[in-house]
Protein backbone atom coordinates (compact mmCIF):
# COMPACT_ATOMS: atom_id res chain seq x y z
CA UNK A 1 0.00 0.00 0.00
CA UNK A 2 1.31 3.45 -0.86
CA UNK A 3 0.66 6.71 0.92
CA UNK A 4 -1.53 9.26 -0.83
CA UNK A 5 -0.36 11.81 1.74
CA UNK A 6 3.27 11.22 0.76
CA UNK A 7 2.35 11.53 -2.93
CA UNK A 8 0.54 14.83 -2.28
CA UNK A 9 3.39 16.21 -0.16
CA UNK A 10 6.01 15.28 -2.76
CA UNK A 11 3.86 16.73 -5.56
CA UNK A 12 3.36 19.99 -3.66
CA UNK A 13 7.08 20.39 -2.94
CA UNK A 14 8.09 19.48 -6.51
CA UNK A 15 5.48 21.84 -7.99
CA UNK A 16 6.69 24.67 -5.79
CA UNK A 17 10.37 23.97 -6.54
CA UNK A 18 9.79 23.78 -10.33
CA UNK A 19 7.10 26.51 -10.45
CA UNK A 20 8.81 28.74 -13.01
CA UNK A 21 10.23 25.98 -15.19
CA UNK A 22 8.87 24.52 -18.39
CA UNK A 23 9.58 21.28 -20.19
CA UNK A 24 12.31 22.10 -22.74
CA UNK A 25 10.95 22.61 -26.23
CA UNK A 26 7.38 23.18 -24.94
CA UNK A 27 5.30 25.69 -23.03
CA UNK A 28 4.19 23.06 -20.50
CA UNK A 29 4.99 23.37 -16.78
CA UNK A 30 7.88 21.15 -15.71
CA UNK A 31 5.84 19.48 -12.97
CA UNK A 32 4.15 17.44 -15.71
CA UNK A 33 7.48 15.68 -16.29
CA UNK A 34 7.77 14.84 -12.58
CA UNK A 35 4.21 13.50 -12.44
CA UNK A 36 4.80 11.38 -15.56
CA UNK A 37 7.96 9.87 -14.06
CA UNK A 38 6.05 9.18 -10.88
CA UNK A 39 3.21 7.53 -12.82
CA UNK A 40 5.70 5.21 -14.54
CA UNK A 41 7.25 4.02 -11.28
CA UNK A 42 3.94 3.91 -9.44
CA UNK A 43 2.48 1.54 -12.01
CA UNK A 44 5.61 -0.63 -12.11
CA UNK A 45 5.97 -0.73 -8.32
CA UNK A 46 2.38 -1.82 -7.77
CA UNK A 47 2.94 -4.68 -10.19
CA UNK A 48 6.33 -5.67 -8.72
CA UNK A 49 5.83 -7.28 -5.32
CA UNK A 50 8.28 -6.26 -2.64
CA UNK A 51 8.85 -2.76 -4.01
CA UNK A 52 8.93 0.21 -1.64
CA UNK A 53 6.35 2.22 -3.55
CA UNK A 54 6.67 5.23 -1.26
CA UNK A 55 10.40 5.43 -1.97
CA UNK A 56 9.60 5.27 -5.70
CA UNK A 57 7.00 8.03 -5.41
CA UNK A 58 9.12 10.44 -3.39
CA UNK A 59 12.25 9.99 -5.51
CA UNK A 60 10.36 10.13 -8.79
CA UNK A 61 8.47 13.28 -7.91
CA UNK A 62 11.55 15.01 -6.51
CA UNK A 63 14.28 13.54 -8.74
CA UNK A 64 15.27 16.85 -10.37
CA UNK A 65 14.91 19.16 -7.37
CA UNK A 66 18.52 19.17 -6.19
CA UNK A 67 19.87 19.35 -9.74
CA UNK A 68 17.53 22.00 -11.15
CA UNK A 69 16.09 24.06 -8.27
CA UNK A 70 17.15 25.79 -5.09
CA UNK A 71 15.37 23.31 -2.81
CA UNK A 72 17.56 22.32 0.11
CA UNK A 73 18.75 18.85 0.98
CA UNK A 74 17.69 19.63 4.55
CA UNK A 75 14.07 20.11 3.47
CA UNK A 76 14.06 16.81 1.60
CA UNK A 77 15.55 15.03 4.60
CA UNK A 78 13.11 16.68 6.99
CA UNK A 79 10.04 15.80 4.91
CA UNK A 80 11.06 12.45 3.40
CA UNK A 81 14.13 11.11 5.21
CA UNK A 82 17.74 10.24 4.45
CA UNK A 83 16.91 7.35 2.10
CA UNK A 84 14.97 9.64 -0.25
CA UNK A 85 17.72 12.26 -0.14
CA UNK A 86 20.32 9.59 -0.91
CA UNK A 87 18.25 8.39 -3.88
CA UNK A 88 17.81 11.91 -5.24
CA UNK A 89 21.52 12.62 -4.87
CA UNK A 90 22.33 9.44 -6.80
CA UNK A 91 19.94 10.54 -9.56
CA UNK A 92 21.58 13.99 -9.72
CA UNK A 93 24.26 14.39 -12.39
CA UNK A 94 27.67 15.54 -11.24
CA UNK A 95 28.02 18.73 -13.28
CA UNK A 96 31.69 19.06 -12.27
CA UNK A 97 32.58 16.03 -14.41
CA UNK A 98 33.11 16.27 -18.18
CA UNK A 99 29.86 15.47 -20.02
CA UNK A 100 31.27 12.23 -21.40
CA UNK A 101 31.86 10.89 -17.87
CA UNK A 102 28.55 11.91 -16.30
CA UNK A 103 26.41 8.94 -17.37
CA UNK A 104 28.99 6.39 -16.20
CA UNK A 105 29.32 8.16 -12.85
CA UNK A 106 25.56 8.52 -12.51
CA UNK A 107 24.88 4.86 -13.24
CA UNK A 108 27.60 3.78 -10.81
CA UNK A 109 26.01 5.82 -8.01
CA UNK A 110 22.49 4.66 -8.89
CA UNK A 111 23.56 1.00 -8.85
CA UNK A 112 24.70 1.48 -5.24
CA UNK A 113 21.11 2.39 -4.32
CA UNK A 114 18.04 0.19 -3.81
CA UNK A 115 16.41 -0.99 -7.05
CA UNK A 116 13.60 1.56 -6.59
CA UNK A 117 16.11 4.27 -7.52
CA UNK A 118 17.09 2.27 -10.60
CA UNK A 119 13.40 2.22 -11.49
CA UNK A 120 13.16 6.02 -11.19
CA UNK A 121 16.10 6.48 -13.57
CA UNK A 122 14.56 4.17 -16.16
CA UNK A 123 11.19 5.91 -15.78
CA UNK A 124 12.81 9.32 -16.19
CA UNK A 125 14.39 8.28 -19.48
CA UNK A 126 11.15 6.63 -20.65
CA UNK A 127 9.34 9.93 -20.15
CA UNK A 128 12.11 11.94 -21.80
CA UNK A 129 12.13 9.66 -24.85
CA UNK A 130 8.34 9.82 -25.20
CA UNK A 131 8.48 13.20 -26.91
CA UNK A 132 10.56 14.52 -29.76
CA UNK A 133 13.98 15.99 -28.98
CA UNK A 134 14.21 19.75 -28.48
CA UNK A 135 14.40 21.49 -31.87
CA UNK A 136 17.87 22.93 -31.20
CA UNK A 137 19.47 19.48 -30.69
CA UNK A 138 21.80 18.27 -33.41
CA UNK A 139 21.71 14.72 -34.78
CA UNK A 140 24.87 13.98 -32.78
CA UNK A 141 23.21 15.20 -29.55
CA UNK A 142 20.12 13.08 -30.27
CA UNK A 143 22.28 10.02 -30.95
CA UNK A 144 24.31 10.60 -27.77
CA UNK A 145 21.08 10.91 -25.76
CA UNK A 146 19.80 7.65 -27.21
CA UNK A 147 23.16 5.98 -26.56
CA UNK A 148 22.93 7.09 -22.92
CA UNK A 149 19.44 5.57 -22.80
CA UNK A 150 20.86 2.27 -24.02
CA UNK A 151 23.51 2.44 -21.28
CA UNK A 152 20.78 3.13 -18.71
CA UNK A 153 18.78 0.16 -19.97
CA UNK A 154 21.74 -2.20 -19.97
CA UNK A 155 22.88 -1.14 -16.52
CA UNK A 156 19.52 -0.99 -14.73
CA UNK A 157 17.22 -3.43 -16.57
CA UNK A 158 17.31 -5.99 -13.76
CA UNK A 159 15.41 -3.64 -11.45
CA UNK A 160 12.08 -4.11 -13.20
CA UNK A 161 11.14 -6.04 -16.37
CA UNK A 162 8.17 -3.79 -17.22
CA UNK A 163 10.18 -0.58 -17.09
CA UNK A 164 13.09 -2.20 -18.94
CA UNK A 165 10.76 -3.29 -21.75
CA UNK A 166 9.11 0.14 -21.93
CA UNK A 167 12.50 1.82 -22.03
CA UNK A 168 13.75 -0.43 -24.83
CA UNK A 169 10.62 0.31 -26.86
CA UNK A 170 11.12 4.07 -26.43
CA UNK A 171 14.79 3.70 -27.41
CA UNK A 172 13.77 1.89 -30.61
CA UNK A 173 11.21 4.58 -31.49
CA UNK A 174 13.65 7.38 -30.71
CA UNK A 175 15.98 6.00 -33.34
CA UNK A 176 13.71 7.57 -35.96
CA UNK A 177 15.04 11.02 -34.95
CA UNK A 178 18.57 10.00 -35.87
CA UNK A 179 17.82 9.05 -39.47
Image (spheres, helix red, strand yellow):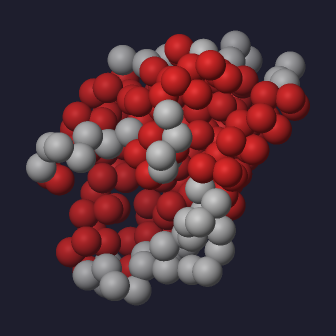
Q: Is residue 144 above or below residue 8?
A: below
Question: Residue at point 48% right, 73% down?
Answer: 24
Using the rendered view, name the quadrant where residue 161 is placed. Answer: top right
Instruction: Work out which quarter of the rendered image holds the C terminus and state it.
Output: bottom left
Residue nearest the observer in this picture, 18 or 118: 18
Using the rendered view, name the quadrant where residue 160 is placed. Answer: top right
Question: Residue at point 38% right, 72% down?
Answer: 175
Q: Is residue 93 left or right of residue 4?
A: left
Using the rendered view, name the quadrant where residue 97 is placed. Answer: top left
Q: Is residue 125 above or below residue 122?
A: below
Q: Is residue 75 left or right of residue 53?
A: left
Q: Position of residue 7 (x, y in %)?
A: 79, 35
Instruction: Work out which quarter of the rendered image holds the N terminus and state it.
Output: top right
Q: Is residue 86 above or below residue 15?
A: above
Residue nearest the observer in this picture, 145 or 92: 92
Q: Position of residue 67 (x, y in %)?
A: 41, 45
Q: Position of residue 117 (x, y in %)?
A: 51, 28
Residue nearest the observer in this picture, 123 or 92: 92
Question: Residue at point 84% right, 24% down?
Answer: 3
Q: Is residue 99 above or below residue 28?
A: above
Q: Position of residue 91 (x, y in %)?
A: 42, 36
Question: Residue at point 74% right, 44% down?
Answer: 11
Amino acid sequence: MWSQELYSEALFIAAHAHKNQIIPGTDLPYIIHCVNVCNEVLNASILHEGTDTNLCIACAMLHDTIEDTDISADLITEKFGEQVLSGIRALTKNSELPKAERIVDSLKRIREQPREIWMVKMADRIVNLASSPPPHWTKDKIKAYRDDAIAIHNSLKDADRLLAARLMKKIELYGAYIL
